[in-house]
Amino acid sequence: MTQANKSELKIEAHHCYRCGHPFSEERRKTKHHSIPKSLKLDRNIIIPICEPCHKELNGIDPKLKPPKIQIKVWRGMIENFKQFIIKQESIIEKYEKEEETT
């Protein structure tokens, strides 16, 4: 794994993280954002997957089941976000208490 920039963690591999096939001319390596870029979150994890799997993952077929690695990533991101919210709540409560006393 490498840090692509402050907000992205990039996983390095020579095989697709979804299907396990090695990358080749037919299965070109692509960069899959575990959290859709459209959500504009501060953090993301870039997972190497082959072009066919990437097309499936980004397709609109509701029957597609996300791979276990993606589910783990989502759970981790959700937990981090929960911790962020808890911290923000405590900061807000602190400021509200200060306003009440002034």
Image: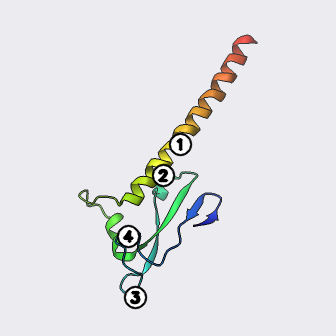
Q: Please, what secondary structure does the residue beneath circle 4 have?
A: helix
Q: Earlier in the sequence, mark 2 or mark 4?
A: 2
Q: How many marks?
A: 4
Considering every residue shown, the one lying at the far right of the view is 102
Expressed as whole percent of the image width and height from the top left, the position of residue 16 reads: 41, 73
Mark 1: give few (<14), some (14-19) or many (20+) Cα within 10 Å. Answer: some
Mark seen at residue 39: 2
Q: N-terminal of the two: label 4 or label 1?
A: 4
Q: Earlier in the sequence, mark 3 or mark 1?
A: 3
Amino acid type of the residue that numbered disc 3 sits on in the rendered structure: Glu
Q: Quadrant of residue 4?
A: bottom right
Q: CA distance from mark 2 to mark 1?
A: 13 Å
Q: Is residue 57 left or right of residue 44?
A: left
Circles 2 and 3: CB atoms closer than 8 Å: no
Nearest the camera: 75 or 54? 75
Q: CA distance from mark 3 to mark 1?
A: 38 Å
User: Are discs 4 and 1 less than 8 Å apart at CB?
Assistant: no
Per the rendering, the mark at residue 58 is: none
Amino acid type of the residue that numbered disc 2 sits on in the rendered structure: Leu
Read off the residue under disc 1: 81
Residue at position x 53%, y 67% from top? 11
- Residue occupied by mark 4: 54
Amino acid type, mark 4: His
Look at the numbered discs 3 and 4 and tell me whether their residues touch, using CB distance below 8 Å: no
Point out the tag, 2 or 1, that comes first from the N-terminus.
Answer: 2
Q: What residue is disc 3 on?
A: 25
Question: Tag 2's secondary structure?
Answer: helix
Q: Quadrant of the N terminus?
A: bottom right
